[in-house]
Image (tube, grey):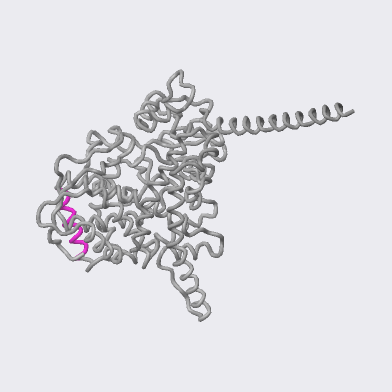
Amino acid sequence: MVFDVISTSTDSSTLQLASLIFAGCVIIVSVFSYYAKEERPYPGFKLVGKEPGEWTNAKAKARFVQSAVQIMKRGMDECKGKVFQVIGSNGPVIIIPPSFADELRNNEHLSLTGFGERNFFPTYPGLEVFGHGIGEDHIFHDVVRKNLTQALGGMTASLSEEATKVIGELIPPAKDWTPMQFAHISPMLAARLSAKVFLGEPICHNQAWLNISIRYTVDAFSAAKRLRTFAPWVRPLVYPFLSELRVAQDHIKQARSIIEPEVAARRAARREAALAGTKTKSTDAIGWFEDVAAGRPFDVVYAQLLLSVVAIHTTSLTITTLLYDLTANPQYISLLRDEIAQVLREDGGWKKTSLYKMKLLDSCMKESQRVHVLGANVMTRRVEQAVTLSDGTRLPKGSHIAMPTFQMYDPRHWGPDADRFVGHRFLDMRNEPGQENRWQFVTTSAEHMGFGHGQHACPGRFFASNEIKIAVAHLLLKYDWKFEGEQPRSLTESEYVPDPSARILYKSREPEIDL
């Protein structure tokens, strides 16, 4: 009797243990299968960049990071302008030739949010910022596209005043040629100008915030890059131990301690004004987010960090690259000084239309962006519902797509001088009948996708344009520039990343007009 009881108990425990093991195996296999699917190439598309015999995507991913442009050029040549796929840094990506850009630019079934979810892991702590601003409520996008753009005309003079302060601090007066690493100071220049508009006084001069606004992008990108080194099914297991994620979380925590008290004070002031029957007008992004959210849940700290991510480093890189291009082509510097001084004399200072009138400067900016592309691909999207292209190619639901950018310096599009900086190139094109607005710095097209193209083109490009023009006006009128040797080269082949250790020489000069 006792033996029977023990035997029955043992059989029951064994059965329970076996059931638990079986259930665990099912869960593990299911999770592994789900994530393994994310790594599998899409059926029906030629795969370029992965060699025969490679059982995993690790080598193909590393190869793409190092030689993305070459791999996509090879694909375009082998497929004769047809769609193909590569193994990108985070899995398979279908490469769409630029000839389809206008066809797809406003397609509602293509999601920027979805592509960002795979690349920047917004469900992991420290990276939530990347999923916040591109959500379905459109609060972030509306603030940038509407409020920020509409306010540009009234902030030109104040941005120039801020540029005077920050450039004077970052680049001290020098009578003789003085070496400096401009790439080291350009992020702070962009951060100060951006904070003036995004946060207003007093935070725009808060050094702790300025450091966070610069470092968060670098450290968050490092965290995402670190996560990509792990197989998808391993990431949920290892992320708590990654120091890169903890650094990003610390930035967010510090940002909250700076921004949230200011937001609380602003909200209290609004309530008092409302009780007194007084209307308040928002003059920076803190207020604009409050206006657009209109009571909907919204994390203003995530929003401000995302503004920094999309604004500071691309703007600082563009300023650095343009300064290098102009220094290498000094004939444009004197022409630009004349243009800037003439416009400001005619307008009696910085006016709403002053920046629009600086057309050679606009052309030089667009040309610098063309020659030194800041990314190997654009128009990155996830296909939310199957899409059929005009040539009959079917893009499956759930696939990730992108377009290459190398056509921006392809001689077949731009002629034999495609690899050269020709500052007046777009000014000449704008002077052609009917082309006045097509080739502005902020205008996107299938031929020039420096800001992307279509409904998801960079909504902050109008602000970036103004910011860059003001900064460059101060840099050119107040200083002379020359290289110690040759123009600094890019650190990578896939995108233009100027060597941050490169030195450039400057000395002070008397500006043609008071800025």
At a point 40% along the width and 44% down the height, the residue shown is 452
**375 drawn magenta:** no
Expressed as whole percent of the image width and height from the top left, the position of residue 260 reads 47, 64
The quadrant where residue 478 appears: bottom left
Range covered by the magenta-colored residues: 331-345
Label the magenta part by its dominant secondary structure. Answer: helix
Name the residue located 26 percent from the left edge and 41 percent from the top edge. Answer: 499
Residue 173 point in image, percent of width and height: 15, 59
Q: Tell me the quarter of the picture where residue 19 sits.
A: top right
Residue found at the very far front of the displayed protein: 2
From this viewpoint, which residue is outermost toward the bottom?
276
The C terminus is located in which quarter? bottom left
| Residue 344 on the magenta span | yes
Residue at 53%, 79% (x, y): give it: 275
Residue nearest the observer in this picture, 425 or 450: 450
Q: Is residue 354 left or right of residue 214?
A: left
Image spot of residue 467 (x, y percent): 31, 57
Instruction: Report the front residue among 351 and 27.
Output: 27
The location of residue 23, given as percent across then percent down, is 69, 32
* Left or right side of 158 for 459: right
Q: Which residue sits furthest left? A: 176
Counting every numbered tag in the picture gives 0
